[in-house]
Image (cartoon, helix red, strand yellow):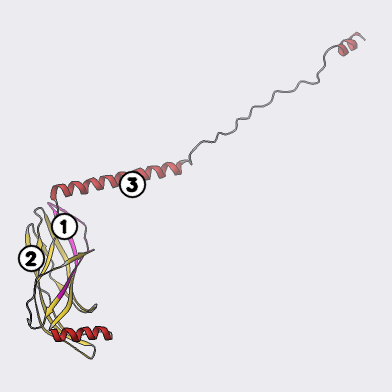
């Protein structure tokens, strides 16, 4: 009875409750893992390469100060240029000087193709002999175009031809398609493929004096 009374008089809170378990939630770390790290590394490498290449080009220019190679048409001989039944018969010889003004840069002309055009219609393509051009050197090219070519000329272009036939001076374009490498010391660059454009006013049978014409580079 006493035990029962003591049990009744004592504080009773029910069965003991076990302590709450501590759950460690995974922390949300900033970033996107290895992918972002690789991307950042790649970006740094690209920026470093751009800076290094830019500095190399600047140093190259400061040391060598390359000047543009100059092309001039110094003389032309046109002995025939007739249009009949949409066919042009022509006989054209062109003298071109190529001046390399650089003191430390040589040029390999690995491929040279000369083309003649009239009213954007190609008349003929002529391959020229490859060569190497040294420092402070002037070279000469002498393409000759002869033969006949079918052309598609509109009424306006035919009218232009008739006007030029009366004047005896024809608008003929000569273009050089090049494949070149530059040489500095023992180092040779990769190949470039520029185009040289010469817009000419060519007199028939030297009916009028020809003025030397500077040609333009086109990349």
Left of 55 or right of it: where is 38? right
Residue at image coords 9%, 70%:
212
Left of 17 or right of it: where is 180? left
Residue at image coords 30%, 43%:
48
Residue placed most toward the observer, 124 or 161: 161
Residue placed most toward the observer, 5 or 92: 92
Whether the residues at callouts 1 and 3 have beta carbons within 8 Å, the answer is: no
Left of 203 or right of it: where is 121? right
Label for residue 182? 1
Residue placed most toward the observer, 160 or 89: 160
Asked if 109 appears above or below 118 in the picture, the reply is above
Label for residue 29? none
Screen quadrant of the N terminus: top right
Q: Position of residue 30 (x, y in %)?
A: 50, 37
User: Residue most toward the right?
Assistant: 1
Q: Which residue is mark 2?
A: 139
Mark earlier in primary sequence (2, 1): 2
Q: Secondary structure at mark 3?
A: helix
Mark 3 packing: few (<14 Cα in 10 Å), some, or many (20+)?
A: few
User: Residue most toward the top?
Assistant: 2
Q: Which residue is mark 3?
A: 46
Q: Secondary structure at mark 1?
A: strand
Bounds of the magenta segment: 176-200
Q: Secondary structure at mark 2?
A: strand
Task: Compute the Cα span from label 2 to label 1.
Answer: 16 Å
Task: Compute the Cα span from label 2 to label 3.
Answer: 41 Å
From the image, give the main secondary structure of the stretch colored magenta. Answer: strand
């Amino acid at each position: 009875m006493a035990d029962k009374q003591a049990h009744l008089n004592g504080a009773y809170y029910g069965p003991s409750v076990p302590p709450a378990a501590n759950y460690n939630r995974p922390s949300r770390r900033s970033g996107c893992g290895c992918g972002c790290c690789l991307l950042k590394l790649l970006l740094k490498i690209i920026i470093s390469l751009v800076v290094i290449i830019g500095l190399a080009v600047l140093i190259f220019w400061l040391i060598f100060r390359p000047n543009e190679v100059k092309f001039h048409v110094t003389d032309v001989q046109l002995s025939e240029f007739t249009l009949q039944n949409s066919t042009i018969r022509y006989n054209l010889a062109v003298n071109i000087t190529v001046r390399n003004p650089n003191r430390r840069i040589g040029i390999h002309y690995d491929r040279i193709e000369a083309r003649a055009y009239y009213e954007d219609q190609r008349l003929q393509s002529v391959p020229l002999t490859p060569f190497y051009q040294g420092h402070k050197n002037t070279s000469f090219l002498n393409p000759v175009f002869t033969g006949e070519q079918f052309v598609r000329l509109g009424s306006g272009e035919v009218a232009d031809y008739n006007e030029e036939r009366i004047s005896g001076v024809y608008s003929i374009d000569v273009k050089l398609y090049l494949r070149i490498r530059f040489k500095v010391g023992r180092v040779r660059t990769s190949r470039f493929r520029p185009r040289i454009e010469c817009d000419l006013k060519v007199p028939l049978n030297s009916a009028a004096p020809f003025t030397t014409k500077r040609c333009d580079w086109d990349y």
